[in-house]
């Protein structure tokens, strides 16, 4: 989802302008756009006066939430939902739009901007459970990727490279300690532990993501992982992923099983090698993600 630069907006979209009369608007816009041709930058929120969104993104996350009525915080709510699904928000610098600001509120009788801002901020808190501005600017969770190579297993290099770019550190462990597997993993990390327990102990980030090195993650799964780092709750102890079997012959997917593969490091959860997941206590705060990964063999 993208938005333009403008003369009037809260946040990073506002730029200084070189005109005071609207007759000079077009000349300024053309010159500024030419000077910034092809440039854009990522942000955490966009102001809703002008947005360009891909159709499939809107179909996935939905439009403006009508609980916010005339407006204010409906754009923040949409931005957070888009980022929680792993999509980017960007400001397109070579698109300039003049924004008069709050004109809708000005022409409507009986509306009070400050009162509406306060009311809708409360509505946003009720919806999200926390202050929405705090959520927007909260730092994404960090992830320690623990790569596990099963006995006789291989390393799916393309997958490991892709997931590794989403992790903040990588630790590895080989079940049979084969030289071939250690060499393959050495391309991604020099932190290769002699036991799985030691590998888990080497993790230092907020969450530990444990995957087998021969599992496959597609682009959608990687995108959702990006969104999960933004969306995961501050009290969440573990997150379930759907693990499905991919047949070696055709790659067809069979019915899968949900496994707790992402765990908050401070929760101290132990790994169950039989089921291939973290063991969570009864009543633990566990989220279910939309991430699906393919495995040539299920535990």
Image: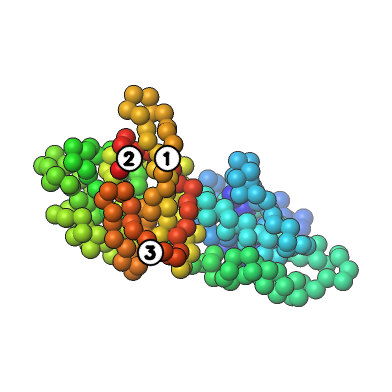
Report the side of 45 relative to 280 (left or right): right
Which mark sits nearer the N-terminus, 1 or 3?
Answer: 1
Tell me which corner region of the image, top left, top right, bottom left or bottom right, holds residue 194.
Answer: bottom left
- Secondary structure beneath dot 2 equals loop
In terms of secondary structure, where does tag 3 sit?
loop
Question: Which one is in front, 175 or 1?
Answer: 175
Pointer 1: residues within 10 angstroms few (<14), some, or many (20+)?
some
Residue 270: percent from left, percent from top? 29, 61
Residue at x 21% of width, y 59% of height: 197
Of mark 1 and mark 2, the one earlier in the sequence is 1
Name the residue that disc number 1 marks. 256
Q: Residue 87, position in %: x, y?
A: 52, 49
Residue bearing the label numbered 2: 298
In the rendered image, the quadrant that contains the C terminus is: top left
Q: State the CA–CA distance, disc 1 to disc 3.
A: 22 Å
> Could you say which disc has been placed on residue 281 in the image?
3
Q: Secondary structure at mark 1?
A: loop
Work out whether residue 1 can be spotted: yes
**Closer to us: 295 or 60:** 295
Direction from residue 200 to residue 260 in the image, left or right: right
Foreground label between 1 and 3: 3
* Comparing labels 2 and 3, the label whose residue is closer to the camera: 3
Q: Residue furthest right?
A: 109
Q: Marks 1 and 2: CB-CB under 8 Å?
A: yes
Task: Reply above or below: 88 against 120.
Answer: above
Residue 109 as seen in the image, left or right of residue 141: right
Residue 17: tell me if it is visible.
no
Quarter where residue 280 is shown? bottom left
């Amino acid at each position: 989802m993208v938005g333009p630069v403008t003369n009037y907006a809260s946040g990073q979209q506002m730029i200084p302008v070189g005109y005071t009369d609207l007759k000079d608007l077009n000349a300024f816009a053309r010159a500024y756009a030419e000077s910034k041709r092809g440039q854009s930058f990522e942000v955490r929120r966009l102001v809703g006066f002008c947005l360009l969104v891909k159709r499939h993104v809107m179909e996935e996350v939905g439009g403006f939430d009508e609980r916010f009525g005339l407006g204010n915080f409906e754009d923040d709510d949409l931005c957070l939902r888009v980022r929680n699904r792993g999509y980017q928000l960007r400001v397109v610098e070579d698109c300039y739009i003049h924004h008069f600001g709050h004109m809708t509120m000005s022409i409507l009788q009986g509306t009070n901007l400050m009162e509406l801002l306060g009311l809708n901020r409360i509505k946003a808190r009720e919806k999200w459970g926390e202050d929405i501005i705090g959520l927007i600017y909260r730092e994404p969770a960090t992830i320690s990727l623990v790569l596990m190579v099963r006995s006789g297993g291989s390393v799916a290099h393309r997958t490991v490279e892709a997931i590794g770019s989403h992790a903040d550190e990588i630790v590895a462990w080989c079940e049979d300690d084969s030289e071939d597997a250690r060499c393959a993993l050495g391309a991604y990390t020099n932190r290769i532990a002699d036991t799985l327990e030691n590998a888990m102990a080497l993790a230092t980030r907020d969450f530990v993501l444990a995957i087998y090195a021969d599992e496959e993650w597609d682009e959608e799964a990687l995108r959702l992982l990006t969104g999960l780092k933004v969306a995961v709750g501050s009290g969440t102890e573990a997150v379930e992923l759907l693990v499905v079997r991919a047949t070696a012959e055709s790659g067809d997917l069979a019915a899968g099983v949900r496994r707790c593969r992402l765990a908050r490091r401070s929760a101290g959860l132990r790994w169950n090698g039989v089921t291939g997941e973290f063991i969570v206590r009864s009543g633990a705060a566990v989220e279910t993600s939309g991430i699906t990964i393919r495995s040539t063999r299920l535990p």
